[in-house]
Image (tube, rainbow, N blue to C red):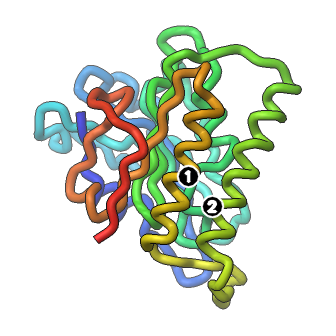
Amino acid sequence: MFVNADNMWEAFYDAEDGTSEIEVCGYLANKELEDQVSHCWDFPRQITDDLYTTDGELTPVVCGVAGRGDGGRANCSYEEPYGSIIWHTHPLNSKPYPSPEDIIKGLKPRDDPLEIKDNLLICRWGIWEWSAGNKQVWDSRKKNEYKEFIKEKGHELAEDAYSDVPENSLGKRRVDLNKTIHSSILEFIYDLDEYFTEFKFQIQFTSWNDARPYYYLNFGGGGGGAGYCSIQ
């Protein structure tokens, strides 16, 4: 299965108004999941029959929108059943890698058909995808432990990426993907894969050079492989 990455970029990610940005989240739907589309029609109806043009193509369904100066974060309020492949964006001024909350969201089991099989993050550097084949229940202590580990590894990645980058007019730092960041991303991937081994956790990053025009899902959507990233 695959998704048109160019459409996701243009419609949901590259949406600045000069002072603030939007953050969007939802799930990916196919023809078999069309009955779920109505759950997200509190937002603009971007889903129409003519979008289902290619066999195996998934369509992004928007379930949460935040930003444009409201100071909020995207809040996906799904009605059951949830889509099994969820996605969200990080705007240009946001961190171009998964947060602890992003990663943890897919580690815990839910009752079928609410199970999250695959997670996608659309960001400045490219597309992150992760999945856990052995979901587990944990207590608040373990949750805090997991969050602190992911946070630490995220800080290490950010330090490598932004250490010499000045802030822009919004007090944010931006940097394009380069070979140094590429190496740091692979370390981030390796550390998370190792730490969450018991969850059968897999995470992959694909740069925009390789994600366009079509991004093929590797975990919940079929395929395989982890830790892939190329720089041109």
* Residue sitting at x 35%, y 55%: 8
Which one is in front, 231 or 19? 231
Expressed as whole percent of the image width and height from the top left, the position of residue 101 reads: 69, 41
User: Amino acid under label 1?
Assistant: Glu
Residue 104 screen position, x and y as percent = 66, 33
The residue beneath circle 1 is: 187
Question: Looking at the image, do the residues carrying marks 2 and 1 touch, with CB atoms under 8 Å apart?
Answer: yes
Q: Label 2, label 1: how many angstroms apart (C-alpha)? A: 8 Å
Residue 147 in picture, x, y percent from top left? 76, 40
Residue appearing at x 63%, y 84% in the figure? 165
Quadrant, the C terminus: bottom left
User: Which secondary structure lies at badge 1?
Assistant: helix
| 222 or 44: nearer the viewer | 222
The residue carrying mark 2 is 157
Q: Is residue 55 left or right of residue 135?
A: left
Mark drawn on residue 170: none
Task: Tell me if residue 146 comes above or below residue 190 in the rendering.
Answer: above
Query: In the image, is 39 to the left or to the right of 108?
Result: left
Q: Which residue is at 32% across, 23% downward?
A: 33
Label whose residue precedes the other's in the sequence (2 or 1)? 2
Amino acid carrying mark 2 in the image: Leu
